[in-house]
């Protein structure tokens, strides 16, 4: 049986097919299941999960305010992947621009630094997605 995570963001989208082209074809997610009649898809990428639901003004959806692009202002979704390079290639082939180019970053986590190769891209509705390839840990450098 399909294992659902305890926290799964549901993103409202303007065009489910355009969003699926981005999330599935470019980022590599799989469609775990979908309800086309409801404009809904549940996606999974090695345990990273997200739900997409197409906005339908008369459907009684849980919208707390009118949506305006870019959607998801103030939020970025970090997703761990095996390697970022193939995803960057797919995005380039699809002519999707990166929001922030790929770089290696080290973040302090108590007494270690956690490394990740990361880049940011916006989905068709402007949701900010950060793809991360883990680089390991190292001791914190003294200041």
Image (cartoon, rainbow, N blue to C red):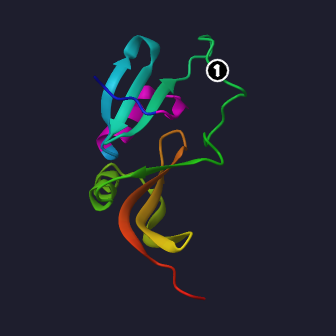
Residue 21: x %, y % from top left: 35, 36
Q: Quadrant of the C terminus?
A: bottom right
Left/right of residue 3 with respect to residue 126 in the rendered view:
left
Choose top left, top right, bottom left or bottom right for residue 18: top left
Image spot of residue 100 (x, y percent): 50, 63
- Residue under circle 1? 62
Residue closer to the observer: 21 or 64: 64
Residue at the (61%, 43%) spot, across then down: 70
Q: Is residue 105 above or below residue 93?
A: below
Viewer-side residue, 83 vs 88: 83
Residue 9 in the magenta stretch? The answer is yes
Is 82 situated left or right of 96 in this image?
Answer: left
Q: Is residue 112 magenta?
A: no
Q: Is residue 58 left or right of residue 130?
A: right
Give whichever of 11, 134 is nearer the camera: 134
Displayed quadrant of residue 132? bottom left
Number of disc labels: 1
Quadrant of the image for the N terminus?
Answer: top left
Q: Which residues are magenta?
A: 6-25
x 34%, y 46%: residue: 27
Q: Residue 139 placed where, x, y %? A: 46, 79
Q: Is residue 57 above or below residue 22?
A: above
Secondary structure under the numbered disc 1 in the rendered image: loop
């Amino acid at each position: 049986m399909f294992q659902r995570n305890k926290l799964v963001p549901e993103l409202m989208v303007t065009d489910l097919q355009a969003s699926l082209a981005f999330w599935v074809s470019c980022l590599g997610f799989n469609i775990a299941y979908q309800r086309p009649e409801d404009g809904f898809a549940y996606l999974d990428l090695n345990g990273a999960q997200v739900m997409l639901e197409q906005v339908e003004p008369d459907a009684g959806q849980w919208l707390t305010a009118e949506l305006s692009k870019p959607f998801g202002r103030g939020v970025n979704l970090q997703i761990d992947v095996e390697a970022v390079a193939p995803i960057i290639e797919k995005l380039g082939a699809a002519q999707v621009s990166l929001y922030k180019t790929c770089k290696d970053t080290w973040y302090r986590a108590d007494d270690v630094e956690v490394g990740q190769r990361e880049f940011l891209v916006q989905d068709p509705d402007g949701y900010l997605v950060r793809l991360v390839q883990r680089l390991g840990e190292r001791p914190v450098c003294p200041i």
